[in-house]
Amino acid sequence: MNALSLALAALLLGAPAKAPQPNQGAKVSAKGSAKGSAKGSAKVSAKVSAKVSAKQRRQSQKLKAEADAAYKAEDYQAALRLIDEAYALDPQPNYLANRALVLQQLARYAEAIEALEGYLKSAPPEDKAARARALIESLRPPLRVETDPPGAQVTRRGETAPLGVTPLDLRVLPGRLSLILEHPKAERMLVELEVKPGEPKQARYTLVLKKVIKPVAPPPPPPPDRTPAWITLGSGIALGALSGGMYALAASEVGERDTARSRADWDAHQGAAEAWYYSSLLGGGVSLGLMSFGAWMLSSEDP
């Protein structure tokens, strides 16, 4: 039990508080409780006293003394049971403060705070009330959470409602705390920390930034295959050259025809000239068509 709890016990119970051995509680004395009761709580007790018989009060005080002994023996479960039975028989406000001290030793901090708040409702003297409020504060130690970069949302693990955004100051119950830190530019982080009663806690975490993956530009399309166009254009040029050769042969046959000595020679050269001539015309037409089509293919494939 810390020094604040010891001081509170001494003030509430009216007994001098001795520093305990590790984990040893201060004596909770019924006699001290009676002496330490002040005018504010006495008014509340007076209203209850009318309904509490002398037998109940004696039994309550006996249970209270047994609770003191159990507390001193560090049997906090028994001390809690006995102080609850004592309060059920004679609901003295000081018993709530005693109950809070036992609950603190059992690490049931939320219930300890509830018991102290119930004690404060009995309007105790200001010195006792101040110490009770101080103990409540120690059972809700301040916690500051910081992150690098700041602006991370803090959520308690298992809950959905966020506690706030870093840097974040809050009060929490002592014990182990699991927090989830989420930042739009960083990886989600789960952290564990231990909060002790009466000890302010500051925790700072460096978040791992997310890797920014730049979109990769698609590769440029392959150049168009102009081979068919060049083949078509080349075929047209070759056929044009061939047509020119056939026209030359036709002209040569005409020359041979004009020097023929017989009718049969003339007819033979005339037939050959006509054949070569018409072949050259046909070849020239096809050549012109192939060259035109090849040129169109080349122009249509340009970007």
Image: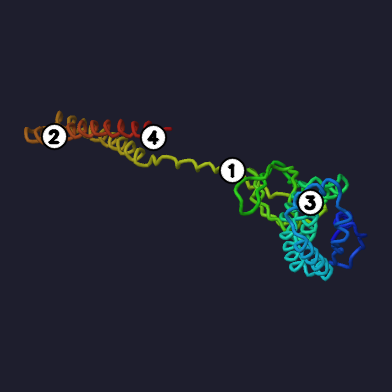
Which is in the foreground here, disc 3 or disc 4?
Answer: 3
Secondary structure found at label 2: helix
In this view, the residue in front, 249 or 169, is 169
Residue 239 percent location from the top left of the image: 27, 37
Element at label 3: helix
Asked if the residue under mark 2 is in contact with the one under mark 3, i.e. CB atoms within 8 Å, the reply is: no
- Sequence-wise, the earlier of marks 2 and 1 is 1
Distance between the alpha carbons at the discs numbered 3 and 4: 104 Å
295 vs 153: above or below: above
Q: CA distance from mark 2 to mark 1?
A: 79 Å
Q: Is residue 180 above or below residue 253?
A: below
Mark 3 — residue?
A: 45
Q: First in sequence, mark 3 or 2: give its number.
A: 3
Give the CA separation, mark 4 to mark 1.
33 Å
Badge 3 or badge 4: first in the primary sequence: 3
Residue assigned mark 4 = 301
Image quadrant assignment for residue 293: top left
Q: Nearer the viewer, mark 4 or mark 2?
A: 4
What colour scheme does the image use?
A: rainbow
